[in-house]
Image (tube, helix red, strand yellow):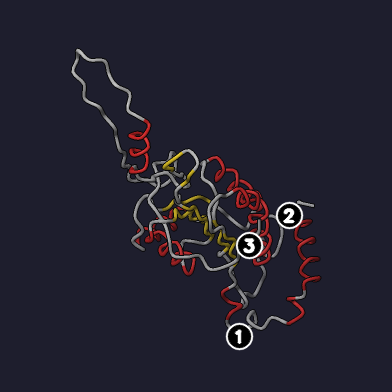
Amino acid sequence: MALQAAVLPCTLSVPQKHKGNLAAVVKDTAFLTVHQKSTQKPRVPSLSVRAQAVATAPVATPGASTSTSANKKTLRQGVVVITGASSGLGLAAAKALAETGKWHVVMACRDFLKAAKAAKGAGMAEGSYTIMHLDLASLDSVRQFVDNFRRAGMPLDALVCNAAIYRPTARTPTFSADGYEMSVGVNHLGHFLLARLLLDDLRKSDYPSRRLVILGSITGNTNTLAGNIPPKASDPEKARKLWEISEKFVGLA
């Protein structure tokens, strides 16, 4: 089942309360009561009444679906993970999706407090997002994020690989926790491992619009060195070899 690489639609919803460091939510429940006299035996609501109560109850849990019958599912809230969502395009995308009410945004960021401040400053409603720690400069942190995300019990319907660093004027190189040059470790290897580990989660999604989006905003500016990509860089055979090399770098092959 192929994954689409495209710009996400502007959509999102308010999730149910989570434990730990997950974002607070607004909880709204519907109750069905049948009033009886004390001398009468309580009646069991008919199946048709039960179905009606389920249909009118709001969807509060990220990724939870509701149904009007045993064989028909209604559209559920989507869950999207955005790396680098504390500033720039990542924050703008998170805000746009959160405001639509159809997506729950997981802000995967290195600095938890910065992300929380950014979300509040952008006016994102509480409960429309969850902040989770992710340091792409550490492959162990990437693996821990994937484990934490799965433990949270949310499905994955879209992954936006947005975070990146670009330091063309740096006098001396810096290195990731695994010993790679920082931009290679963060922009390429960290995101490669993240996407590779979450690929099965995306495949399991029953959401009608699953997406894997990889951004390279600086490459869209032809006035920069990064924006002048040689034609050979898009060669399919070279791409296949680079993929195999990347798998070896992160220990997947």
Disc 3 packing (10 Å; few <14; some 14–19; many ≥20): many
Q: Amino acid at mark 3?
A: Val
Rendered residue at 26%/29% (across/down): 33
| Residue at the far bottom in the pictured view | 223
Find the distance from the CA under tag 1 to the CA under tag 3. Answer: 22 Å
SS type, badge 1: loop
* Image position of 241 with respect to 80: above or below: below
Image quadrant holding the N terminus, namely bottom right
Whether residue 246 appears in this view of the structure is yes
- Foreground residue among 86 and 128: 128
Percent x, y of residue 230 = 73, 82
User: Which residue is the site of mark 1?
Assistant: 222
Judged left or right of residue 93, residue 29 is left
Closer to the chain start, of discs 2 and 3, is 3
Mark 3 lies on a secondary structure that is helix
Q: In the rendered image, which residue does mark 2 sit on? A: 250
Of the image marks 2 and 1, the number of the one nearer the N terminus: 1
Q: Is residue 18 left or right of residue 206?
A: left
